[in-house]
Image (cartoon, rainbow, N blue to C red):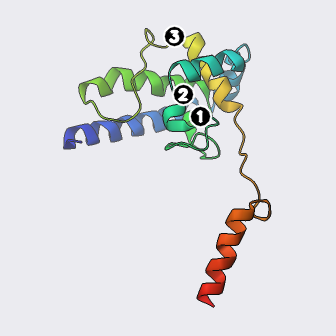
Amino acid sequence: MNRTAGITGSALGIVVLGLSFALGAQAQSGANANANADPERGREVYYAHACYGCHGYNGETGARDLVGTGSPLVENVDVFIAYLRGRADYLPLFPSTRMPSYSAAALNDADARDLFAYIRSFERNEPAIEEARALREILEAAENEGG
């Protein structure tokens, strides 16, 4: 990645973070705006746009977790859509291998709201350590070797 692309990507992140704080007061209205969103339709959008390629099939197994990160990008629908649009407006000038750009022509607002609703339906699903026999055996073997 060239230096300009890194600076622009960082600047975009700062703008989106600032936008998330500005929209924080509107979080309830964002939730209301997403009240008619359809998570099942969002699931179709998630698969059609191959989001699972980086975010996994459940949002927690891919290269970029969507679940439990505390990211403001997946807390408010308006911030989420602003992030998608911001990428479309700025990052095509500095291509990278990161998340694709999504202009309104590529992903309309209704589909983006449905996608957001689907992402918000994700839940952490990892088993407790006690339930993961293979992991427990690895940890026990490591303790035995170290002690």
Q: Which residue is mark 1?
A: 74
Question: Which of these two is toward me, 50 or 78?
Answer: 50
Q: Identity of the amino acid at label 2? A: Phe
* Of marks 2 and 3, the one in the foreground: 3
**Percent coordinates x, y for residue 38 in the rendering:** 71, 16
Q: Residues within 10 Å of mark 1 (few under 14, many from 20)?
A: many
Q: Is residue 139 shown above or below 130?
A: below
Distance between mark 2 and mark 3 Cα atoms: 13 Å
Give the quarter of the image for residue 70.
top right
Report the residue that reaches farthest toward the bottom: 147
Q: Label 2 to label 1, Cα distance in Å?
A: 6 Å
The residue sitting at 75% across, 54% down in the picture is 127
Contact flag, marks 2 and 1 (Cβ < 8 Å): yes
User: Residue flagged by tag 3: what amino acid is it?
Assistant: Asn
Query: In front here: 21 or 2?
Result: 2
Name which of mark 2 and mark 3 comes first in the sequence: 2
Picture quadrant where residue 15 is located: top left
- Front residue of 40/90: it is 40
Image point 65% across, 82% down: which residue? 143
**Hey, which quadrant is residue 135 in on the image?**
bottom right
Is disc 1 placed on a helix, strand or loop?
Answer: helix
Type of amino acid under label 1: Val
The residue identified by callout 2 is: 80
